[in-house]
Amino acid sequence: ERPLCNECFICDRSGDPRCLCEDHVPQCHEGCHQCEKVDTRSGTTMYQCRSFEYYDCANE
């Protein structure tokens, strides 16, 4: 099952596209290859997957 992404951004143009996800989440999904810590305005530590992955994109 693919992780849900509310804000898919920059998808490749293959038949089954991989995308970057702009969501800030409490932890990256298991298949993420490049998880980065994001400092938020509220001071809460969040994470963002910065690698192209397969998602179920809510904004398509």
Image: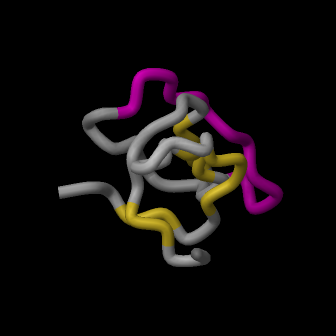
- Hey, which quadrant is residue 42 in on the image? bottom right
- Taking 2 as reference, is 24 left or right? right
Tell me if residue 23 is in the magenta stretch.
no
Can residue 47 be seen in the rendering of this structure? Answer: no
**Extreme front residue here?**
15
**Extreme left residue here?**
1
Please state, as top left, top right, bottom left or bottom right, where the N terminus lies in the image. Answer: bottom left
Residue 22 at x, y percent in the picture: 66, 53
Q: Is residue 46 above or below residue 7?
A: above
- Taking 53 as reference, is 38 left or right? right
Q: Over which residues does the magenta segment extend?
A: 32-43
Tally of marks: 0
Residue 29 at x, y percent in the picture: 33, 44
Q: Nearer the viewer, residue 41 or 22?
A: 22
Please state, as top left, top right, bottom left or bottom right, where the C terminus lies in the image. Answer: bottom right
Figure coloring: secondary structure
Q: Is residue 50 above or below residue 26?
A: above
Report the residue at 71% width, 47% height from top: 10
- Taking 14 as reference, is 20 left or right? right
- Taking 58 as reference, is 1 left or right? left
Can residue 20 be seen in the rendering of this structure? Answer: yes
Report the residue at 44% width, 49% height from top: 15
Residue 11 at x, y percent in the picture: 63, 47
Q: Nearer the viewer, residue 15 or 42?
A: 15
Q: Nearer the viewer, residue 48 or 7?
A: 7
